[in-house]
């Protein structure tokens, strides 16, 4: 039992934080927001130069090995800068599904493109998607970076398929999205050809587990950044002849944010570690992490606006990037109530 | 990063569980499951001694002083198994968690020899004298005076909230030993024997009807000149060190007691149907998540060996658990409904859950109120400027 980062993990964290802080600047993110929500140069540099894109994907599937702890470290660093990257849909949800549920050929055919960043994949999940002789039918409304994807990993609750974005029967409609760093698209399948993944149950389980942990980690990074930036402002902004951070009404709110963030940090790395170790607690931990970290991020981002006063409400200030990302994370991959109900069922049984 | 325990640790866990369960099924079965800190004090002092005889009293201490030099993982395991076996809380918790570690860190060799083996053996029960009627959150405004006279310290003043003073043998007291000094300067820590004419203890009845806390009056109370811990004037430094000890391994044992409370609440909710109410389900899930996060926060804090940086998990721990428990008490009353507001029998005595509702109001006050915790977090953790202070 040693619940601290190893030296290697600390180093990955330092490398990732330095990379995103230097490159995922507000200016570049805003350029991406005006386009399709992807900073292409950043994505290429992340995947090809930094060499961290294969983390969390087993080596025998072409990845860099390591586990969800390391993946969470990277997602936390990216989240701190609200980086405009298709990491969630492409590297986390889709790549994890293929690595866990794809055949050796499917892995070899698709993972190298995803890990190099040359192919962007979108994750399409809806319980109502069905397959019959004529192909896949159904739709999903909120596919992250779906408008930029060349490949879709499509899942229902029981099936998992690979579908090229340009296949017949596939309609992709990019949507004007509140969080422009991760715009959604509606993907409609009308008899689209789907290549089934070899082990759909494994694919779905791995994608969702990694997805819960990765967005929780991203939320943790965002929450900490929102707090750090507000603290910096509180120390320099003077009103009534004093830095506003010296007023208890102000500093106690910041303290409350730190209390939540510390718990979110425990939640994220507990969940990541529990999955990596195959612990019995993993099933509960991933729901705890997703719901807790998402709510923490929203609390911090909302306070970031309030505690900055008028400047925090402007488009120019970055507070709204955090605020919108936080809201999106709360709803995606199951909202907080759904995740807590999963926990409630584990401790109380089904409601009568 | 690793959460699992080694095979050797799991074997140690079995050893702990076997011993504790045997004791709770045998000679000490009458105290199993007691949750109130004031219940059966004499039997629980005997239990302290039983722990001491079997060298389970203070396992993290050096062997030289009656401990086992146990590793962190072993201490975590013992604390967890202790509560899991339904063993009541330690009546000497101030001795083993505060006085002992303070003497270990700041005491002379002579003081270590004199006190540590007896604390570990459960023979010396300590309580603490910090707060005063005029020095609560503002601990540095202590006024109880100590002066040296004919080779003895003579102490006059009043302490309050001295938990379990009525069953303790010794008290360690912060006193103002420098005439005319103010604030954190001029304070000295003294260890005093309680059984003497100059010390009088009066219980304070609390909102749950129990009296765990006391007022302690010092009227020319005496102790030998070498009774201070550290040097004269070191009182504040030591008091601050003490607060750090309060966040030790014992927090994990405390969490297991919380686990028992939450399990009792879950059972009550299932029994009366509240567990079918979606809003209650959400709140119970939040409580479950909060408790798990407390455990992993504590493990982060205990695993952290880099003390050069501010440890956010440690700094936020007190307000986190206190608030969690207060919320649990409120949730308990929502689950129980009016049935929680009536006691069986004619005494004003409460079962675990209604008692939790009442007692947990103290959790967010003692050991630094939630408001003081927020100041500490904001100033030490976030580096925010202090609120300007009035004259001390």
Image (cartoon, helix red, strand yellow):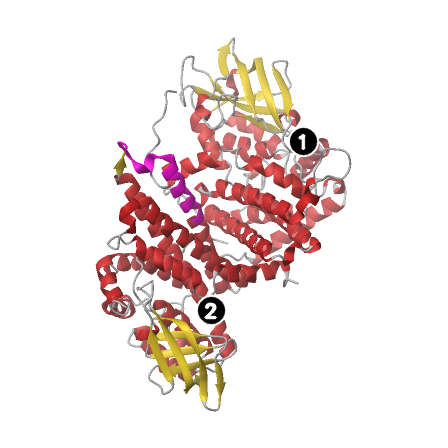
Q: Does the magenta stretch include residue A258?
A: yes
Q: Residue B97: x and y, percent?
A: 55, 35
**Residue A219 on image: x %, y %:** 39, 57
Residue A45 visible in the current orientation: yes
State whether residue A57 is above or below residue A325: below
- Residue A244 position, x and y percent, is 31, 37
Q: Which residue lies furthest to the top in this view?
A: B150
For the residues labelled 2 and 1, the Cα–Cα distance comes to: 50 Å
Crowding around mark 1 (Cα neighbors within 10 Å: few <14, some 14 to 19, many 20+) is: some
Q: In which quarter of the image is residue B119?
A: top right
Q: Considering the image in quadrants, where does the C terminus of chain A appear?
A: bottom right
Relative height, residue A88 to residue A80 (above, below): below
Above or below, B326 relative to A72: above
What element does badge 1 sit on? Answer: loop
The mark closer to the camera, 2 or 1, is: 1
Chain ID for label 1?
B
The chain identifier of the residue carrying mark 2 reads A
Magenta part mainly helix, strand or loop? helix
Residue to which mark 1 is pinned: B209
Residue B279 in the image: x percent, y percent?
57, 55
B265 relative to A208 in the view: left or right: right
Residue A161 vs residue B112, the one in the foreground: A161
Q: Closest to the observer: A57 or B54? A: A57
Residue at the far bottom in the pictured view: A133
Residue beneath label 2, please? A208
Give neighbour class at mark 2: few <14, some 14-19, many 20+ (Cα, 10 Å): some
Tell me whether the residue at label 2 lies in contact with that at label 1, contact meaning CB atoms closer than 8 angstroms.
no
Q: Nearer the viewer, residue A224 or B255?
A: A224
């Amino acid at each position: 039992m040693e619940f601290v980062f190893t030296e290697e993990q600390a180093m990955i964290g330092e490398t990732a934080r330095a990379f995103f802080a230097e490159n995922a600047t507000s200016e570049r993110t805003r350029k991406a927001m005006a386009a399709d929500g992807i900073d292409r140069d950043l994505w290429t540099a992340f995947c090809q130069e930094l060499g961290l894109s294969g983390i969390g994907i087993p080596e025998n599937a072409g990845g860099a090995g390591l586990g969800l702890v390391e993946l969470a470290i990277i997602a936390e660093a990216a989240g701190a800068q609200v980086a405009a990257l298709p990491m969630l849909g492409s590297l986390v949800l889709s790549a994890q599904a293929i690595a866990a549920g794809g055949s050796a050929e499917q892995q070899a055919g698709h993972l190298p493109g995803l890990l190099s960043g040359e192919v962007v994949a979108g994750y399409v999940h809806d319980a109502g998607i069905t397959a019959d002789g004529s192909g896949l039918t159904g739709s999903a409304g909120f596919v992250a970076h779906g408008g930029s994807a060349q490949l879709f990993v499509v899942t229902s609750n029981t099936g998992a398929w690979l579908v090229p974005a340009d296949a017949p029967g596939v309609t992709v409609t990019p949507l004007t999205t509140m969080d422009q760093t991760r715009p959604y698209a509606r993907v409609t399948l009308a008899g689209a050809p789907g290549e089934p993944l070899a082990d759909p149950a494994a694919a779905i389980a791995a994608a969702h587990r990694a997805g819960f942990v990765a967005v929780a980690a991203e939320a943790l990074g965002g929450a900490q950044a929102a707090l750090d930036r507000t603290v910096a402002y509180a120390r320099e902004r003077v009103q009534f002849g004093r830095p506003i951070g010296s007023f208890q009404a102000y500093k106690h709110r910041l303290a409350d944010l730190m209390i939540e963030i510390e718990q979110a940090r425990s939640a994220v790395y507990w969940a990541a570690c529990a999955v990596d170790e195959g612990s019995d607690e993993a099933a509960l931990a991933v729901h705890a992490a997703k719901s807790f970290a998402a709510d923490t991020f929203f609390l911090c981002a909302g306070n970031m606006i309030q505690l900055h006063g008028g400047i925090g409400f402007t488009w120019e200030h970055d507070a709204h990037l955090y605020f919108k990302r936080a809201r999106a994370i709360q709803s995606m991959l199951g909202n907080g109530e759904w995740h807590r109900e999963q926990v409630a069922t584990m401790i109380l049984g089904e409601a009568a | 990063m690793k959460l699992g325990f080694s095979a050797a640790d799991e074997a140690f866990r079995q050893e702990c569980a076997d011993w504790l369960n045997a004791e709770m099924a045998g000679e000490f079965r009458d105290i199993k499951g007691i949750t109130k800190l004031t219940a059966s004090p004499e039997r629980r002092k005997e239990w302290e001694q039983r722990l001491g005889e079997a060298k389970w009293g203070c396992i993290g201490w050096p062997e030289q002083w009656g401990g086992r030099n146990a590793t962190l993982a072993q201490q975590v395991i013992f604390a967890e198994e202790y509560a899991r076996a339904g063993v009541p809380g330690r009546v000497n918790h101030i001795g083993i968690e505060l006085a002992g570690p303070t003497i270990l860190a700041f005491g002379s060799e002579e003081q270590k020899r004199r006190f540590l083996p007896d604390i570990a053996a459960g023979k010396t029960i300590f309580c603490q004298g910090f707060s005063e009627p005029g020095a609560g959150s503002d601990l540095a405004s202590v006024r109880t005076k100590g002066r040296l006279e004919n080779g003895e310290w003579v102490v006059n003043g009043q302490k309050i909230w001295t938990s379990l003073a009525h069953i303790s043998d010794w008290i360690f007291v912060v006193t103002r030993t420098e005439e005319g000094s103010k604030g954190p300067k001029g304070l000295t820590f003294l260890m005093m024997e309680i059984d003497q004419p100059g010390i009088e203890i009066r219980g304070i009845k609390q909102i749950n009807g129990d009296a765990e806390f006391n007022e302690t009056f010092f009227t020319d109370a005496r102790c030998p000149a070498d009774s201070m811990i550290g040097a004269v004037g070191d009182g504040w430094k030591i008091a601050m060190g003490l607060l750090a000890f309060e966040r030790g391994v014992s927090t994990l044992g405390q969490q297991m007691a919380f686990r028992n409370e939450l399990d009792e609440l879950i059972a009550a909710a299932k029994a009366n149907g509240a567990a079918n109410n979606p809003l209650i389900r959400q709140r119970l899930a939040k409580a479950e998540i909060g408790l798990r996060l407390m455990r992993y926060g504590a493990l982060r804090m205990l695993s952290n060996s880099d003390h050069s940086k501010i440890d956010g998990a440690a700094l936020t721990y007190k307000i986190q658990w206190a608030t969690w428990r207060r919320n649990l008490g409120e949730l308990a009353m929502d689950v129980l409904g009016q049935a929680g507001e009536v006691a069986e029998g004619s005494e004003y005595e409460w079962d675990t859950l209604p008692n939790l509702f009442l007692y947990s109001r103290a959790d967010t006050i003692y050991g630094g109120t939630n408001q003081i915790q927020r100041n500490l977090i904001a100033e030490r953790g976030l580096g925010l400027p202090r609120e300007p202070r009035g004259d001390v």
